[in-house]
Image: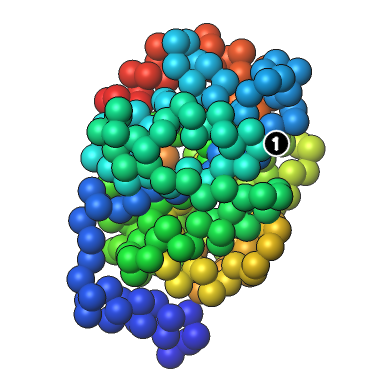
Amino acid sequence: MTASSENQATRAADQESRGISSPLQTPALLLVGGLGTRLRSTVPSLPKPLASVGKKSFLELLICQLKHQGIRRVILCTGYLADQVENEFGDGRALDLEISYSKELEPLGTAGAVKLAQSHLADPFDFLVMNGDSFLEIDLRQLIQFHRDRNALVSMAVVRVEDSSRYGTVQVESNQKVIGFVEKAGSDGPGWINAGVYVFSPEVFQYIPQGRSSLEKDVFPHLLGKGVYAQEHSGMFIDIGTPEDYRRAQQLCDRLYHAALS
């Protein structure tokens, strides 16, 4: 048996022995602490996830999507202008949710923020992780089930775009196992990209170092062969990382809210 098979067998046995939480009990960890430097000229006084899309903030759009799909426990990983996020959402009771905060005192990157939030995820169950500056039309329960069916360490949603130059691409085998990542190459060809929505098994914390690190650059490439899978999606995808894409989100506002609540 290979090391990868042994890891998956161990996860399967562990899940069977402790019982698996319902997808509705799965907590969601949202990464909302980034500096948002590329969008600073458009929203200079707000953390990027609080930038408005229509009458609500982009972050509220994501939280509405989670709530509509039955997720009730949300951990917001804050950093830059963290108090504004906490003042906006409080403990979540106004939205009929349980919201807590994991606040970084210095920039930790996407993986560092997940590691810092570990104490909020004491239950030994899978958990969702989502970027706070991108939206994907997705059935989260299907992604969670996809993850469990494969006894995966990490499952990521991927989406095909016509211009992958901004993102880099994900290389996926026919069995949906991730076998590689291609950094941004400057070419404008189509490809499958990481859509910033994941399910993690708690064992992933063993592979995330303390301090600053990136999921995309420092963690995921070292997990290949340990059970990383990609579920392909064709739904609506947008991020608001640049002024151009933020303006496009405004134009697509009605479609975004329809997608979040459908």
Could you tell me which residue is drawn at 56 percent across and 29 percent down? 84
Judging depth in this view, the residue of 259 and 76 nearest the camera is 76
Residue furthest out toward the bottom:
1
Question: Mark 1 belongs to which amino acid?
Answer: Leu
Residue 47's x, y, as percent?
62, 29
Left or right, 28 with reference to 46: left
Say which quadrant the C terminus sits in. top left
Residue 34's x, y, as percent?
65, 39
Q: According to the image, label 1 marks what residue?
A: 35
Residue 138's x, y, as percent?
36, 37
Instruction: Tell me where residue 233 sits by quadrant.
Output: top left
Judging depth in this view, the residue of 114 and 22 nearest the camera is 114
Instruction: Tell me where residue 36 sits by quadrant.
Output: top right
Could you tell me which residue is drawn at 57 percent across and 34 percent down? 83
Q: Is residue 43 above or below residue 82?
A: above
Left or right, 194 with reference to 155: right
Could you tell me which residue is drawn at 70 percent across and 16 percent down? 42
Q: Mark 1: few, some, or many residues within 10 Å (few <14, many ≥20)?
A: some
Q: Is residue 168 above or below residue 162?
A: below
Element at label 1: loop
Residue 196's x, y, as percent?
52, 43
